[in-house]
Image (cartoon, rainbow, N blue to C red):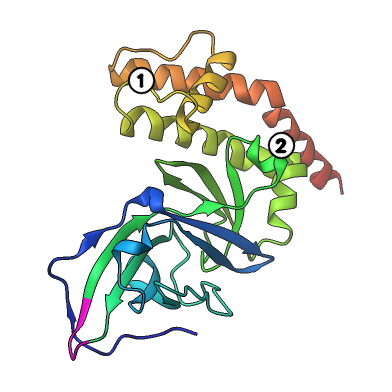
Amino acid sequence: REMQMSRRINHTGRKKIRHSEVEIRLQEQGSGPPSFEVDFRMNRKELPPDADLYVEAYHRNTLQRFGFGTVGAPLPPLDTMLDQVDLSGPVLFRVKVVDSSQQISRLIALADRLAPRYEETEEQRSSLMIIRRMPEMGNLVWKLSFNELHKPVLCINSSVPDGIGQLQHNPFFQSLVLPSAFREVLMYILWNQEGEQDEGSWQEQWITFANRLAPEECPADPDPDIRHQWIDDSVRAFSEKHHFCEHLIRRMEDHNCG
């Protein structure tokens, strides 16, 4: 499945493939690693039809390469499961077009740092975050993964039995995860995104949601103390709305009685 390029590659004079010319969609595979699909939209008339087409998935020091046929006849591999990539964080992709007609293979076109789009149900599309089961998390129960272009991904350790169901329906589990995740998202937005949020972006949607909860709207003042106070107020209001502490105490009392 994974195709390695053994020839030495010349990287000079290559063409840049724009991110808008490639769409990569991640697809969940139950409790296993996700797979992906690719839609190539670049102008292939500008590239040799017999040049080789490759897609690489990578995170940290791990990489998995897939052969996708040639520019003139793209052919996806039978299996695109990401089973050789570190899935403990956001996986990025790159597309390579390689001319192998000479003794030295030449990289003639490249798109790098491509963020995938997650295949979502209608319910997930209306949600403020994506929830995913994630392997290889050790004893970490959950964590958030951020990408500026896509909504936050709440990763639940795949070792937790029915972890996604627990988060969606178990008030006890919700009380331990959701307020902290809510706080972390707001912290990320206010400390990593400068200026006003783009209209319709996931960041704007989160700020709008928090503004409906907090006593005051998100402050324009960059003072860290003022921003921290607004985040505290938002998380408190969010917790009050869902009665998280009450659910936690009730579950603990039921457990002690049992």
Distance between the alpha carbons at the discs numbered 2 and 1 = 37 Å
Side (left or right) of 180 relative to 30: left
Name the residue nearer the viewer: 51 or 251: 51
Q: Is residue 91 visible?
A: yes
- For image coordinates 31% across by 59% down, the residue present is 111
Residue 224 coordinates in the image, percent (x, y): 30, 21
Q: Which residue does the image show at 35% across and 86% down from the upper left?
A: 4
Going from the N terminus, do you reach mark 2 or mark 1 first? 1
Q: Nearer the viewer, residue 5 or 189?
A: 5
Magenta region, main secondary structure: loop
Q: Quadrant of residue 257?
A: top right
Residue at the right extreme? 258
Q: Secondary structure at mark 2?
A: helix
Query: On the rendered structure, is 157 left or right of 228?
Result: right
Looking at the rendered structure, which numbered label has been put on residue 248? 2
Identify the secondary structure beneath mark 1: loop
